[in-house]
Image: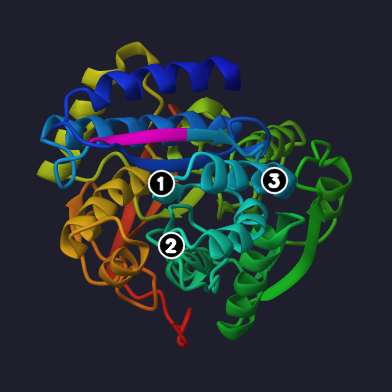
Amino acid sequence: MKTASKFLATVAGTMIAGAALAQDGEPIKIGVPVGLSGANSVVAPSVVQAAELAVEEINAGGGVLGRPLELVVADDGSGAVGAQKAFDSLVFRDEVDVLISMETSAARNAGLPIVSRGKVPYIYTSFYEGKSCNPFLYVNAWVPEQQVPPIVDYLSSEGATKFFLIGSDYAFGRGMLEFAGAYIAETGGEVVGEEYLPMDGTDWTAIISQLKSSGADALITSTAGGAPNVTLTKQLRGAGVDLPYANLAVDEGTAASMGAEAEGILISASYVTGIDSEENTSFLAAMKDKFGEELRTPNDLSVPQYEAVYLYKEAVEAAGSTDARGVLDALGEVSFTGPRGTISMSDQHHAPLTMYLGQVQADGSVSVVEAFENVDPGEQCPNL
């Protein structure tokens, strides 16, 4: 894997070349604070690649309102302290026109006050625990109301009644498992254990020991995307845990990196590479053509990033300028048809999504078990 500094240098070079393809005009700057180091470092390169492709395609078509798009990437370290520095730099030094990024909830929460102070539109492209509400924030990824029920219902239909929950100790991990626990109880199941490790923790031994003695007949985990998913899964397999295992945070790219150790994990996602549509086929071909051997597996964190760049383009064109107020008004009205289908952030700054219940195969790919069309995000931000 490239280091963060080398990866950023590659991104910068690519964007300078891409901008030249667009019509003349002052660049529209897209800030991308993302965890190139820390917990999200496993998946962040795929997110940047997706943004690169969207910018290249739009610039090749003449840009936006005759102006080229330019990416400005900043490493947020996957956490709150790094995010404060990254957001501050992007908003006040680089003076970006918009922020579009996949981040940990800790990073998002730390960055939002800076977004409010700088009055910059922010499209958050990561699945998360829900109910993050800010006039400048829009979300095009899933929330628990869309993601958890298919997993719990499936495990229950397979005979599971006693669930053990394991998470990373921060907003996403706790928020997802709080919703999962409530849904399990509502549908007649029982949570027999719930344990957490710090977001940068790597030794799950004690928690796995509690799991094995709990009497659980199913396991649901919600860890920080990327590295914690890898360490926990490896240690579960090493300890001989063979319970039905659903992961609320693993993406297809991370699953592919784990190979056979991820086999059998249940996931619930708004994107899998196997979606059979013209838009997804074209997207996958374009990604392969652009990145070749360097391509990171497109996944449920990187594809929303690609689509968000296009949603921003549509909003700017609808508003007739990059003025924040006009763009924010337009973001809830526009839509884009891409790899996941037609996406519109029209429901309280969130998006209805088609969800896929899938199971990881031995080669890291995901086999779709069932699809659920246009799942509503539920009550998220009624006062916006």
Question: x, y (%) of residue 283?
Answer: 20, 35
Q: Main secondary structure of the magenta part?
A: strand
Name the residue located 54 percent from the left edge and 14 percent from the top edge: 6
Report the disc number at residue 79: 3
Identify residue type, mark 3: Gly
Question: x, y (%) of residue 193?
Answer: 79, 65
The residue mark sitting in front, 3 or 1, is: 3
Do residues under tags 3 and 2 come within 8 Å of each other at their CB atoms? no
Would you call the spot at circle 2 few (<14 residues within 10 Å), some (14-19), or many (20 or more)? Answer: many
Residue range of the region highlighted in magenta in the rendering:
68-72
Could you tell me if residue 339 is visible in this image?
A: yes
Helix, strand or loop at mark 3: loop
Q: Tell me which label, 3 or 1, sits earlier in the chain.
A: 3
Name the residue carrying label 2: 142
Identify residue type, mark 2: Trp
Name the residue carrying label 1: 300
Taking the magenta stretch, the answer to whether it contains residue 69 is yes
Q: CA distance from mark 3 to mark 2?
A: 21 Å
Do residues under tags 1 and 2 come within 8 Å of each other at their CB atoms? yes
Name the residue located 26 percent from the left edge and 66 percent from the top edge: 344
Q: Nearer the viewer, residue 208 or 306?
A: 306
Q: Nearer the viewer, residue 96 or 164?
A: 96
